[in-house]
């Protein structure tokens, strides 16, 4: 092999290019680097300088059944185990590899070929066959595109924006997982509170039944009062069993959101900071502006538009002429007494496309149509973002008003139920008044629980609509 690089001008040029190629490989040991690439509108903080440096999601061990998990711990468990996070990470890795493939077109191509042949020639005039010729030997060739009107550079730029879009989309998936965990967490808290309320209602209904039976035995009430009390107890039991079923379903939802088997018994801690019902300080207008600037999927949509525009340039340049340099050095050995032979080749190829069935024209049209598609998708996402913020904001405002209203409702219903129970115990009140007051109290408690659940859920959706990271990215 050394002899191939010692023969002729092409050998010297080939050695120099190989040396430059080796130095380039040392200087950039990672073919996926995207140095110099910035996110649209200066959103580069979302994207690592090197996409393959992002750590791979690791499947964590399932927590112990007796351990109570906070919302932050549940979210951490979900981000590590949820299959969507692994899928998004794999998509980002795929686009990073595609970027490396696109960037490799800017480098020379070096090939080593080992040839071995056996030939026999028969004369056309005499019909006598010449002796067999056995030959073998190596050859090294290098080809490099010197100029192509920017087709490769445009394709590298397009793929770089696709890498950026994949990383931004990965961040949005992480936010979706966080929202899924938050919604499941708040729902589980709500239905657990319903179970506790149901137990209290059942105890009150049983106490009323016991009082009705005593009054019936004393001749102060009819058997109809006992039947009505038994009906109230049966209704309380039915509501309690339904609430317990909802708890089981909510536990399955939060397990799936965390990426663990649905049968995993996850225990949760209630929120330590009770700030439900606090009015928002930030205005709706500022939230709308912040959503368009901070949401990673908005930046990803803009990156896809820029990738499509770069693809138009790449498609347009594909139909332009190109200039390619080719160098080759070879050596041939023979099995007989003949000495070896060596050869060198320096070639310059100019390719000028003349007609290809209008393939390049249609490729440009296709790329231009993809630009229109990407722009329309970006505009649709912008409109949907504004709608998401708008709806979540007013849902939060409605839930805030509902919390204040249900607080007064529960206070009044509780006092009414207490008075009705006391009057019934003293024999001056009717059972119907007592059951009605207890039903009103139960309804008020359920509405209070639902109002708190609606408030936390609306806050989580508003954070998600704004593209905020972490829990409660906006401050009430």
Image: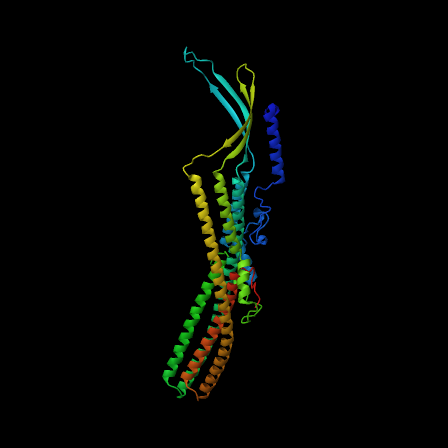
Name the residue: 53% across, 27% down: 113
Q: Nearer the viewer, residue 78 or 224?
A: 78
Q: Quadrant of the N terminus?
A: top right
Q: Position of residue 461 (x, y in %)?
A: 50, 63
In this view, 258 is above or below 350? below
Q: Position of residue 134 (x, y in %)?
A: 50, 18
Q: Nearer the viewer, residue 9 or 119?
A: 9
Q: Is residue 114 visible in this depiction of the protein? A: yes
Name the residue: 53% across, 48% down: 161
The image quadrant of residue 330 is top right
Q: Position of residue 409 (x, y in %)?
A: 48, 78
Q: Is residue 264 visible in this depiction of the protein? A: no
Colour setting: rainbow
Q: How many numbered tags mark residues here? A: 0
In this view, 65 is above or below 239? above
Name the residue: 47% across, 82% down: 417
Q: Position of residue 59 (x, y in %)?
A: 53, 52
Farthest residue to the left: give it: 224
Left or right: residue 36 compared with residue 218: right
Q: Nearer the viewer, residue 11 or 375?
A: 375
Q: Nearer the viewer, residue 218 or 327?
A: 327
In this view, 440 is above or below 369? below
């Amino acid at each position: 092999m050394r002899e191939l690089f010692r023969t002729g001008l092409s050998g010297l040029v080939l050695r120099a290019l190989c040396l430059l190629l080796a130095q380039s490989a040392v200087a950039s040991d990672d073919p996926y680097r995207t140095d110099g690439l910035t996110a649209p509108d200066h959103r580069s903080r979302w994207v690592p300088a090197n996409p393959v440096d992002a750590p791979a999601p690791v499947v964590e061990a399932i927590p112990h059944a007796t351990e109570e998990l906070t919302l932050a711990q549940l979210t951490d468990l979900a981000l590590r185990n949820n299959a969507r996070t692994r899928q998004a990470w794999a998509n980002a890795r795929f686009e990073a590899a595609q970027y490396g493939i696109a960037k490799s077109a800017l480098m020379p191509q070096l090939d080593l070929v080992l040839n071995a042949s056996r030939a026999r020639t028969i004369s056309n005039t005499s019909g006598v066959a010449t002796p067999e010729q056995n030959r073998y030997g190596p050859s090294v060739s290098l080809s490099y595109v010197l100029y192509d009107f920017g087709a490769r550079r445009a394709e590298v730029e397009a793929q770089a924006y696709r890498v950026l879009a994949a990383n931004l989309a990965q961040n949005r998936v992480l936010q979706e997982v966080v929202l899924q965990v938050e919604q499941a967490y708040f729902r589980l808290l709500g239905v657990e509170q319903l179970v506790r309320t149901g137990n209290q209602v059942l105890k009150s209904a049983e106490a009323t039944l016991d009082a009705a039976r005593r009054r019936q035995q004393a001749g102060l009430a009819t058997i109809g009062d006992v039947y009505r009390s038994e009906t109230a107890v049966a209704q309380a039991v039915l509501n309690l069993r339904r609430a317990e079923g909802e708890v089981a379903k909510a536990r399955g939802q939060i397990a799936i959101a965390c990426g663990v088997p649905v049968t995993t018994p996850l225990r949760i801690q209630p929120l330590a900071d009770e700030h439900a019902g606090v009015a928002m300080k930030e205005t709706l207008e500022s939230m709308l502006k912040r959503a368009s600037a901070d949401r990673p999927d908005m930046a990803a949509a803009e990156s896809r538009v820029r990738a499509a525009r770069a693809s138009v340039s790449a498609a347009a340049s594909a139909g332009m002429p190109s200039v390619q340099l080719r160098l080759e050095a070879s050596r041939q050995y023979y099995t007989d007494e003949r000495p070896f032979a060596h050869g060198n080749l320096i070639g310059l190829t100019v390719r000028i496309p003349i007609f290809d069935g209008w393939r390049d024209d249609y490729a440009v049209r296709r790329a231009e149509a993809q630009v229109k598609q990407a722009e329309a998708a970006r505009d649709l996402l912008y409109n949907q973002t504004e709608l998401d913020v708008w709806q979540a904001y007013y849902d939060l405002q409605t839930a805030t008003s509902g919390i204040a209203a249900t607080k007064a409702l529960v206070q009044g219903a509780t006092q009414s139920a207490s008075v009705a129970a006391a009057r019934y115990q003293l024999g001056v009140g009717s059972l119907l008044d007592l059951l009605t007051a207890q039903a009103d109290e139960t309804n008020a408690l359920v509405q209070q629980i639902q109002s708190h659940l609606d408030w936390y859920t609306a806050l989580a959706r508003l954070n998600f609509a704004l593209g905020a990271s972490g829990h409660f990215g906006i401050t009430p």
